[in-house]
Amino acid sequence: MLASYGDGNLVDLSIIIVSWNVRELLDKCLASLQQTRRAIRPGLCEEFSLEIIVVDSASEDGSVELVRERHSTVVLLPQQENVGFTRGNNIGLARARGAFLLLLNPDTEVSPDALAIMLDYMNRRPRVGILGPHTLNSDGSHQSTRRRFPTLLTGIFESTWLSAWAPASVEQNYRMLDTGNDEIVEADWVQGSALMLRREVYEDIGGLDEGFAMYSEELDYCRRAKSAAWQVAYHGGAHITHHGGKSSEQAGALKQIHFQSSKLRYFRKHHGYGRYLILRAILLLQFSWQLCLESAKGALGHKRDLRAQRVRTYWQVLRNGLRVEP
């Protein structure tokens, strides 16, 4: 065991997976976690107890039946509605018994020794409250998941029409391109597809902010942890594969609304109302320009179906207004 606990109900690690209509990917994810039980290297977390919690967000693809039939040791928490990623994780966190907690996307596969490596690292560094692994794409290439906190310039350029004109220094600083993919480095925040935290962090700062329906919730959480004097780190030697965005792909135009609104919520919460207003105005101007541009291209007969789809997306974003509740 990693440690001795007075409460016999505690386990070393709780893994929390929020799933929505990704049955086959969830099956692969859970199968990969079973491999971790049999692949601990000698001298590296030789034994640790593990519980897996799946919060199913009212899937309609047989995910619940799959877990019950093929993964009977999993703690299944089926919901009657789509509770979303953030609330779903909070439901899982409230149920978890782990000294360490891992928020894991269902579209991931975990390398056999990744969890042991991460647990070993965190046990030897008690001030590291949050740890992210080296994440790979489906083809084995590196997926960027370590970050510094965004600036206003980052907010203007990230995932917008202007991204191609972003100064190289903005991208390099934000994505920590001055550090190596295989290194172990301190970061400001790490991506939420696989995020390990200490129970003490959860007890210290609480759960995820459910005002972030989708996106930026891990950015906000890491910022809150660092404000409470916890360190955040990235471990280049612990590998997971993230197949990427399979739940959010089902959200259509809502994906853009959630992404940009969550970005704005973060800036309003941590940088003040003034910067929020500036960023919101710039983002809405960008979407207005894109709407006009795509409408003109469609009118000229260039890929009309594609242009019509984009016009509908941008129009929905503009109708939403990207307003953020306090």
Image: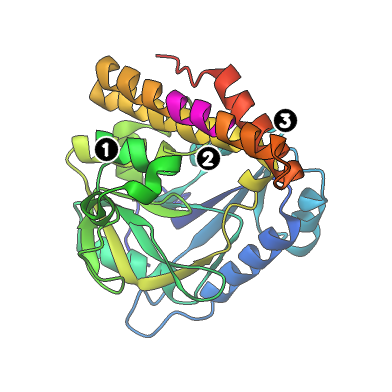
Identify residue for label 3.
81
Residue stretch rendered in magenta on the structure: 284-291
Reply yes or no: does residue 51 show up in magenta: no
Q: CA distance from mark 3 to mark 2?
A: 14 Å
Q: Quadrant of residue 206?
A: top left
* Front position in the image: 219 or 194: 219
Residue 19 visible in rendering:
no
Q: How many marks?
A: 3
Q: Identify which amino acid the numbered label 1 is placed on.
A: Leu
Residue 135 locus on image (x, y percent): 43, 65
Identify residue for label 1.
153
Please identify the residue farthest to the bottom as the structure is shown.
42
Q: Secondary structure at mark 1?
A: helix
Q: CA distance from mark 2 to mark 1?
A: 30 Å
Residue 185 visible in rendering:
yes
Do the numbered discs 2 and 1 sit on residues whose CB atoms are within 8 Å?
A: no
Judge whether 278 appears above or below 308 on screen.
above
Q: Secondary structure at mark 2?
A: helix
Identify residue for label 2.
89
Q: CA distance from mark 3 to mark 1?
A: 37 Å
Estimate how packed mark 2 is, as few (under 14), some (14 to 19) or many (20 or more) residues with alpha carbons within 10 Å.
many
